[in-house]
Image (cartoon, coloured by chain):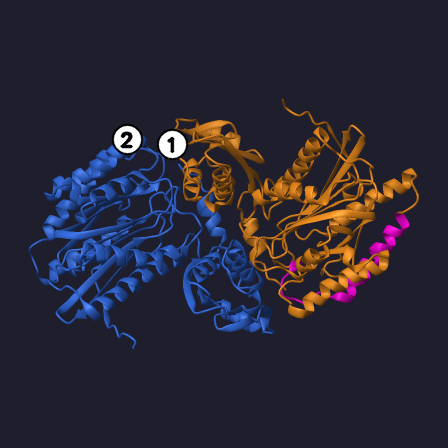
Chain colours: A blue, B orange
Amino acid sequence: MALEVVIRPIDGGVAAPAGFFAAGVRAGIKREDKYDTALLYSVRPAAGAAVYTRSAVWAHPLTLTRAHLADGVARAIAVNSGNANACMGDYGKQAALAMARAAAESLGLRTTDVLVASTGVIGQPLPLEKVCAGIAAAAAEIGGLRGAEDAEAVSRRKESARRAALAIMTTDLAVKERAWEMDCAAGPVRLGVMAKGSGMIHPNMGTMLCFITTDAALPQPLMRDMLRAAVDESFNMVTVDGDTSTNDMVIMLANGGSGVTPAGEDLEKFRLLLNAAAVSMARAIARDGEGASKLIETCVRGAAAQEDARQIARAVCGSNLVKTAMHGEDANWGRIVAAAGYSGARFDPRRLGVSLNGLAVAAAGEGLPFSEEEAKKRLRSAEILIEISLADGNAEAVAWGCDLTHAYVDINAGYRS
Amino acid sequence: MALEVVIRPIDGGVAAPAGFFAAGVRAGIKREDKYDTALLYSVRPAAGAAVYTRSAVWAHPLTLTRAHLADGVARAIAVNSGNANACMGDYGKQAALAMARAAAESLGLRTTDVLVASTGVIGQPLPLEKVCAGIAAAAAEIGGLRGAEDAEAVSRRKESARRAALAIMTTDLAVKERAWEMDCAAGPVRLGVMAKGSGMIHPNMGTMLCFITTDAALPQPLMRDMLRAAVDESFNMVTVDGDTSTNDMVIMLANGGSGVTPAGEDLEKFRLLLNAAAVSMARAIARDGEGASKLIETCVRGAAAQEDARQIARAVCGSNLVKTAMHGEDANWGRIVAAAGYSGARFDPRRLGVSLNGLAVAAAGEGLPFSEEEAKKRLRSAEILIEISLADGNAEAVAWGCDLTHAYVDINAGYRS
């Protein structure tokens, strides 16, 4: 029986769940006068879990965050954009710790209850004084938001959270924050999320950061497993340019502020909400890929095994040839078949079918006659759905990417400093 | 003791070794009036071996070639550009066979002694009548070249081989053919090569084809192993856009026309010659990558294992972020470290060093102070050498790629038909 989940979009981003506050400030890290330092705070201890980059090279904030999450509890996250704090040796290690200390002091927490994230240029010293002053300013703003519950206070709290979402951006064009409310048997719970995607600042790494808050009460090991599964079907299925950053990280905090512990069917519903939230951010990141003009969604069905479906979906979204063909609005399905072919997945090419925004262009491994005019018309859309059908089994996967444009080259060939 | 190998570049490409002839003609497959059909012929049975695409989807010519090479012997190779003969079901299978039959009839050979290769658009029927007429015309040209040994005949033979090298090109800008002569104890042997790289025709797949001829006498199993090893260190280390084609293939024929069977030290020298020939074509393919303005060579030293070195070298050459940075002549070494990080290789990031065209920019996992002006000057070069030093062991690897430019997007976003 299908589970029916009613979720209501609400305002407030990561500060929508009860007991969470967020703020973003301009600390002067970026050359332009932009928001660059964010602070996220929970009024009570929260269960915390994170998923880290699969790169062998970890930026310093990731190492610190993992250490501070060893007990599965956190109260705050300090984030800066404009500098990755990566490949900086002992200075970098101390800088990450200094950020946590600054947040702990300003918010009255233990240093080990503060997590840290950074995004920006690699191999340049983090301007610690500015960042720490920014964290203190953000903490002061959060202090000013607490207590009052009138309409104006609620509105200020939302605006403050939005500035936090702004402060984690690099060359992202769109702010990525959302929140939802869901009814459980014991009452409503809320989930908020903010993310940044593959963007460059005076170009550097395309880092993916995502912060998820919920006022549901969740046992930490369960939340950790749910988060890993959600990341696997969302952020791990996004490819903007195939590069994985030293700084990629997804952190989730559950502070129980709703007084509700989802269980049974409610827990399943919450799991779906978490997955939907992660997919929504993954899509937003793909759509906002550097220089992108189109979101590409590749859906593979009928694979022998999940991993085969995932490999094909990711290879198609990651293929420069597919990306340029979609940019050119060209139904060049041969490139899609070719990407599936080199993906590493096992499948029978003689049973492969392809459709582009609903138009079948290949079946049983061969091209179908189709109207190029109709294909061109359908590919003019800002969203392109590539559907690949196999007849090898029942496994499915979806991946997201974007087209490859002149603007990508311009953004990334620009000089660092 | 290092082996000293003296090899002399000679003219004639794949027809330089004794007993080989090649021709290229305009059969009308491509829309423009360009060479599109090539025929390579050995006057005597040759040991034959091939290395095929690692894609799960094989174009029809590959399946046929593998079948015809089951006995390890071949006499001719028929090649067309402008159509990949891929994903065409039974028609494609029959078309590949028809090409072999046409060559066999024209040259007086058994069909199973003819190999076939194609490159071009996927999923469109090969215009068989044109291709077979082209093969017959090429065979007639080869017939006219045989016998005479005067200077004019030799010159015509070279020109004919050059037209074969032209006929396998798609959007390649440079003809890729070379030949060398090497002295063995029993006399000289020759090796010729022609290749085409990642190019598109009314854009389609970027296919890599390479044909190697030698008049050395080589036992087939030995030659097959030598070819595989050479391909592994050359073509398998080239990445233009990360895509692997359904049609990629390297074929080698050794017809013993020199009367020399290299053995002992001579065999080791021949192995080095074969490797050098393959690397020379791999570099030419990378340099001529679509829209490329720079050749990028990544050299990894000090890895714990060969596979680690290979993974890092390939990931760096394949990174869109590295490719755009090199296009922008920006010493953005963070992107290089990041690519090494996600390559899947095991290494200690704290011991990693990077230099760009000889300028050290990072050591012990951290950035070094360097003059941006000097870096910019060095990166202005048409060839960029990225050297990555680890201190984990003694394994090395080299990979080749090119920068990512507006022209790449233009070529590949252009409409197919």
Q: Secondary structure at mark 2?
A: helix
Residue A405 location (% of width, % of height) = 49, 54
**What segment is highlighted magenta in the picture?**
B119-145
Residue B352 location (% of width, % of height) = 41, 32
Vertical side of B19 occupied by A219: above or below: below
Mark 2, other Cα within 10 Å: few <14 / some 14–19 / many ≥20 = some
In the displayed image of the protein, which residue is found farthest to the bottom? A1
Quote the CA–CA distance across marks 2 and 1.
Answer: 13 Å
Residue B138 drawn in magenta: yes
Under mark 1, the amino acid is Gly
In the visual, does B124 lie left or right of A15? Answer: right
Task: Count the marks.
Answer: 2
Q: Are marks 2 and 1 in contact (CB under 8 Å)?
A: no
In the visual, does B409 lie left or right of A393? Answer: right
In the displayed image of the protein, which residue is found farthest to the left? A147
B35 or A253: nearer the viewer:
A253
In the visual, does A95 lie left or right of A360? Answer: left
In the displayed image of the protein, which residue is found farthest to the top? B1
Residue B413 location (% of width, % of height) = 55, 57
Residue A9 drawn in magenta: no
Under mark 2, the amino acid is Tyr
Q: Which mark is residue A91?
A: 2
Q: Residue at x 54, y 68 (%)?
A: A352
Q: Quadrant of the N terminus of chain A?
A: bottom left
Residue bearing the label numbered 1: B365
